Image: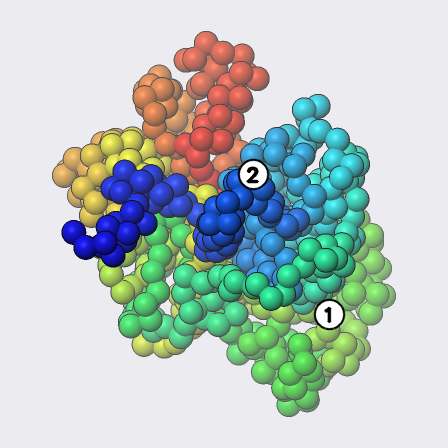
Amino acid sequence: MLPNQQNLQKTMLDADQLSSLQHTIGSYSALQLAWASGYLAAKSEGASAGVSPSAVAAPAATLTILFGSQTGNAKGVAKALAAQAHAQGMVVDLKSMSDFKPKSIKNLTHLLIVASTNGEGEAPDDAIALHEFLASKKAPKLDNLYYSVLALGDTSYEFFCQTGKDFDEYLSKLGAKQISPRVDCDVDYDADAKAWSDSVVNKAKALFGSEVDTNNVVAMPTAGAMSEYTKQAPYAAELSLSQKITGRDSAKDVRHIEIDLADSGITYQAGDALGVWFENDESLVAELISVLNLSADENIVVAGESLSLAEALTSKLEITQTAVNFISFWADKSKDKKLLTISEDKNAAREYAGNHQIVDVVKAAPAEVTAQDFADALRKITPRLYSIASSQAEVEEEVHLTVGLVEYNENDHLRTGGASSFLGKRLEEGGTVKVFIEHNDNFRLPENGDTPVIMIGPGTGIAPFRAFMQEREATTASGDNWLFFGDQTFTQDFLYQTEWQGYLKSGLLTNIDLAFSRDQATKIYVQDRLRAKASEVFAWLERGAHLYICGDMSRMAKDVELALVDIIAEHGKLSTEQAQDYLKELRNAKRFQKDVY
């Protein structure tokens, strides 16, 4: 062997070392890989100069960014924030709260939190452990910590931005000091999130002082780095199929939607959601403009863009979902006694907003308003997220959805949901719909295909479980699969009936339990079927089953959780509190996951 070859061989890692290195860095993010690269380079320089490893300079102060995200919004904001801070020369550590050990918060010096609120004031699944730790007696003093919180929420819920408010309160009580005041964002959060990000990055940079290094900036992945198509830059896809899958006599209109992703390169996993941008119904826009006695052609400005009132109400402003703030605005404009009374009670205003579209609020309490003032009082349109009902292993360059059309009558006028009617009725096959993938790491099949799964998904909550089964079949996963499905009637509302019967016949679906509430005198729901199979459900959990719930958050999900606690208590011979802890441990182990809305 030549001398040069001998020297080269000495510098290379042997097979065991290479395997160890690959195992170690396998879970690193792009930023962590960049940091590790610099760290190892510094160590090599120190070694070549005869400096001991302990003498190598410690890494600079770190800005830790933690996100708690249920649907992906907080994650997207946190990624953009991390890129912005890193571009300013700060060392940044970006993590999901699920990947952060709560006890290690005592080691942090600078922390930014981006947290959404799930349901009625609950922390998102990936934030629960940290949220509970900071509220407990185990939480340490944090006198050396600087922090700020961005809270994402929805004013249509009673506990608006509650999780972010909680984090702010807990950190303050533990002695941490604010870098910048907490900002609470409604569903139209982009402008507020950007203003907070700009402010907090500048203030953090000032705190870092000389430890900011703008000469050694490594590019970070930005939000949506896995695809060029994002919420801000969606893909213009083709609607290839919209097919009603409920019976002619069903009280519901549920559509199976197929969207062609063509050569977009978009990829998704079972459990992800599809973001759908939509346009409002032209007839609804015309009715609203007429009621307001305004001109459709009048120019207004929305987010810096000049366009006609009709264009703004069609494609820029939300008119099918009413914000609580609009109730207060219109009560003040109209001076209507009934509406003023409603607006003074937050719960009453929330309920009224939830049951009335903008046009019906305006009709009930007439008032004069300028086109610009009216537009300024409305939320911007935000995309709707739908659980994906397909696996790419099965459908390739397509994505499938299960969409229930929102329809009801209001004073002899048919009112429909903005996105559901757009996808299900107004958009013709072959038409264009702007979409993006919202990845949901909080709703994933187990990595081990031998693991059994229990799926609870009544109504359109069946969607992700159709994707799960397609994925399990494509990957030849051997784990048992058990579905609990419910709806109103067997003959009219058994969604994807033929497919489920096929899976049962092939053996891929081990068990199926059905609950059709109106097929007998006494209504039966999925939680009743769970209780009827309590001992078997508990046995599946004891042998490692993963448990999933998808569907209505306000009633179904809560009733199912109560049933599960009762099942665990009875068959595990535990107290109610112990059973709740059992379920909590399943959740912490990512064996209990929810996709509820």
Q: Mark 2 points at which residue?
A: 54
Residue 328 seen from this side: yes
Residue 213 screen position, x and y as percent: 64, 61
CA distance for labels 1 and 2:
60 Å
> Circle 2 — which element?
helix
Residue 560 screen position, x and y as percent: 47, 31
Is residue 330 toward the left or the right of residue 8 in the image?
right
Residue 313 screen position, x and y as percent: 61, 77
Q: How many numbered badges does the structure rendering display?
A: 2
Q: Quadrant of residue 586?
A: top left
Q: Which amino acid does label 1 sit on?
A: Ala
> Can you say whether 139 is above or below 462 in the image?
above
Q: Which amino acid does label 2 sit on?
A: Ser
Q: Which of marks 1 and 2 is in front?
A: 2
Q: Which of 270 and 68 is in front in this view?
A: 68
Q: Which of 133 and 472 is in front in this view?
A: 133
Q: Quadrant of residue 97?
A: top right
> Circle 1 — which element?
loop
Of all residues, the one furthest to the left in this rendering is 506
Query: Dot 2, crowdedness within 10 Å: few (<14), some or many (≥20)?
Result: few
Numbered tag placed on residue 377 in the rendering: 1
Q: Which residue is drawn at 44% across and 34% down?
A: 590
Q: Which residue is drawn at 50% across and 36% down?
A: 557
> Can you say whether 177 is above or below 363 in the image?
above
Numbered tag placed on residue 150 in the rendering: none
**Rendering colour mode:** rainbow
Q: Quadrant of residue 589?
A: top left
> Can you say whether 213 is above or below 306 in the image?
above
Is residue 181 toward the left or the right of residue 447 in the image?
right
Residue 192 screen position, x and y as percent: 70, 63
